[in-house]
Amino acid sequence: MRSKIVAGNWKMNKNLTETETLLAALSAKLPDTEAEVMVAPTYINLTSAVRHLESSPIEVIAQNMHFAESGAYTGEISADMLLNVGIDTVIIGHSERRAYFGETDEILAKKVTAALAKGLRVMFCFGEELEDRKSENHFSVVQSQLKNALFSVDANSWSKIILAYEPVWAIGTGETASPEQAQEMHAFIRKTITEAYDTSIANNVSILYGGSVKPANAVEIFSKPDVDGGLIGGAALNADDFVAIIKAI
Ligand code: 13P
C-alpha cells in the first residue's frame, strides 16, 4: 500500500547520548500524523533506539547491511542481526555507499535479494549525479540503476519496497531539486516500473524524495502528486526541523 513516509537518515552522526537526547525530543514533539515516521541511527545505537522508542510510533530503521548470511566479513552487519534487534526496514543503495564504499548495482542487487529473503523491508536509494543531469542523461541513469539493482525482484516482493530518489547533486549541498524536477522524475520512475511490472505495482510503491529537504521547502515538494514523502539527512538531526518536515506532509 502506498503510504506517506518521512524518514531521517542520520548517517555517521550522533553518539549514544546524543541519539537518546534526539529521540526523546522527537517523541515529545511528534505531531499527529498518518505518515510513517522513521529514523536511521548508526548501527551501534540501533538497539538502544529500538528500546527507547518501544511505545512510540517512530520506527527505527538501518542504514545498510551486508548480503551474506554470516561469516568472515569484518566490520559488516547481517540481515539476521538487524531483525534480531527489532529492525524490519533497511536502507540499501544510498549514494554515499555507492560513491565512498564501492557499492555497485551488482552488490546492491545481492543486498536487496538478501534483505527481502529475510523478510526485511527495503528502502532503495538511487539518483543521478550532477554530470548526468547536465548532459541530460538523468532519466537513463535512474532507469539503469533501477533495472540493474531492483528489477530482478519478483512482483510479490514490491509490497516490501520503498523507493527514495536522491539526486546526488542535491544531497548535503543546500541545492534542492525543484518540486517540478522531483515530480517529473517520480512520474518517470512510476512509468519505468509500469513497463517492467504493471500499473498496480507502480501506483502502490511509495517514492520518497531526498536531497536538502528543509522545513522551508518541504511543503512544496510534498505537494507533488508522485512524491510520497522524504528521506531527510541534515535536517533530521534537529528535532524541531524534523518535526516541521513531518508536519509538512
Ligand atoms: P540531506 O538532507 O542532508 O541533503 O541528505 C539527504 C540524504 O542523503 C538522505 O539520505
Image: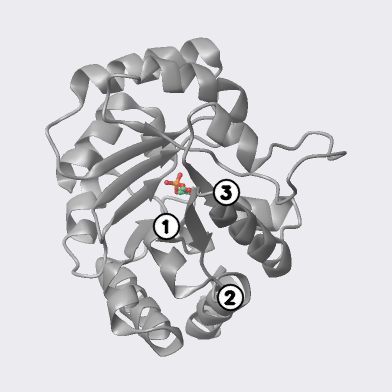
Mark 1 nearby-residue class (10 Å; few <14, some 14–19, many ≥20):
some
What residue is at 64 percent from the left and 55 percent from the top? 114
Foreground label between 1 and 3:
3
Q: Is residue 158 above or below residue 78?
A: below
Residue 176, can we see it? no
Counting residues from the start of the chain, the first of labels 3 and 2 encountered is 3
Marks 1 and 2, how far apart at CA = 14 Å
Marks 1 and 3, how far apart at CA = 11 Å
Q: Secondary structure at mark 1?
A: helix
Side of 213 relative to 211 (left or right)? left
Confirm or reject: label 2 Cβ below 8 Å from ligand 1. Answer: no
Mark 3 nearby-residue class (10 Å; few <14, some 14–19, many ≥20):
few
| Residue that lies at the very extreme toward the top in this rendered image | 17
Give the image quarter of residue 131.
bottom right
Q: Disc 1 designates what residue?
A: 160
Label of residue 152 in the image: 2
Counting residues from the start of the chain, the first of labels 1 and 3 encountered is 3
Instruction: Tell me the amino acid under the disc marked 2.
Output: Ser
Q: Secondary structure at mark 2?
A: loop
- The answer to the question of whether label 1 and label 3 lie on touching residues, with beta carbons closer than 8 A, is no
